[in-house]
Image: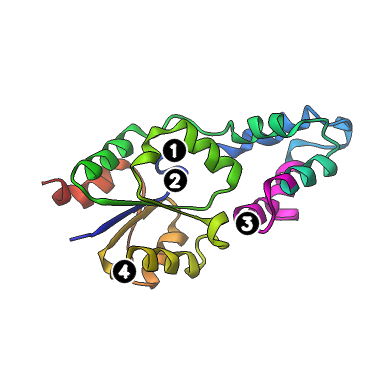
Amino acid sequence: MFKVFVFDLGNVIIPFDHTTISPRLLKYSKKKGEFKPEDIHRFFYKEEELEHKYEEGKIMTAEFINNVRERFSLDISNEEFASIFCDIFSKANREVEDIIRGLNRSGRRLVLLSNTNEMHFEYILKKYEIMRLFEQYILSYRVGCRKPDRRIYEHLIEYTGCRPEDIFYTDDMIDYIESARRLGISAHHFKDATSIYKTLEDTFL
C-alpha cells in the first residue's frame, strides 16, 4: 500500500493557460510597434529560458520582472506585472480536489511536487484552500532544479523517508512520469481524475 501521495500542481490540481500573459504585458510597452506577443513568449521560454531560470531559483522575482520590463520597454509596476503574470489559473479541478480531501480524511500523507516560481506559488497559496492539506511542498524554485531532473525526485524520496515504490505520484507530463519511474517511484500519468481514482480506489476503503 502507498504511504505517501504526491501530486503535481499545474493542470492536475489547477488548470492554467500561460499564453494570456504576453498580449496583456505588451499593452504596457512604450514600443508596441516593435514587438509581438510571441516575442515576449519566446523570451520567457526559448530565447533566454527566463521562466526556467526563475523556476529553478537562479534569479529572484525582482530580477525576473526587471529583465522583462527592460527588454520590452514596459511601463508597468511590479504589482501590475504580478497581477497579469498570476492571472493564468482557473478553478481547481473539483474531482481532483475530492480525491485529495478523501486522502486527507483517511489520514494519508500528502505532498505537492511542482515546477513553479515564487510569484505563482505565493498567489496560489492565498487563493486555493486545497493547498493547506499538503504536509510539504517540494518546489523547483526552492530546491534549485526542475522536473524531470532526477534530483527533484531524490529530494522527494529523501523527504518522505519511504521506499520509492511506496510513493504514489501523478503528473500530466509523461516525461516527468518516466523520470520518476526510473528511480522506482510509483508514478502514474494523469489524464483525468477518473483514472487516478481507479488506481487509488482501495485506499479509500
Judge the density around disc 1: few (<14), some (14-19), many (≥20) Cα neighbours within 10 Å.
some
Residue 14 marker: 1
Residue sitting nearer the eye, 23 or 14? 14
Instruction: Indicate which label's residue lies in the foreground, 4 or 3.
Output: 3
Observer-side mark, 1 or 3, equals 3
Secondary structure at badge 4 equals: helix
Amino acid at dot 1 = Ile
Residue 45 horizontal side relative to residue 126, left or right: right
Q: Earlier in the sequence, mark 4 or mark 1?
A: 1
Q: Is residue 50 magenta?
A: yes
Q: Does the residue at mark 1 contact the one at mark 3 (Cβ under 8 Å)?
A: no
Q: Earlier in the sequence, mark 3 or mark 2?
A: 2
Identify which residue is drawn at 38% across, 68% down: 158
Identify residue for label 3: 57
- Tell me if label 2 and label 1 are in contact, CB under 8 Å: yes
Dot 1 or dot 3: first in sequence order is 1
Range covered by the magenta-colored residues: 39-62
Crowd rating for badge 4 (residues with CA inside 10 Å; few <14, some 14–19, many 20+) = many
Tell me how far mark 1 sits from mark 3, CA to CA. Answer: 22 Å
Question: Of the numbered discs in the image, which one, if any, rests on residue 89?
Answer: none
Q: Amino acid at mark 4?
A: Pro
Q: CA distance from mark 4 to mark 3?
A: 26 Å
Residue at 36% x, 49% y: name it. Answer: 190
- Disc assigned to residue 9: 2
Q: Position of residue 139 (x, y in %)?
A: 50, 54
Q: With respect to residue 14, does 168 lie above or below?
A: below
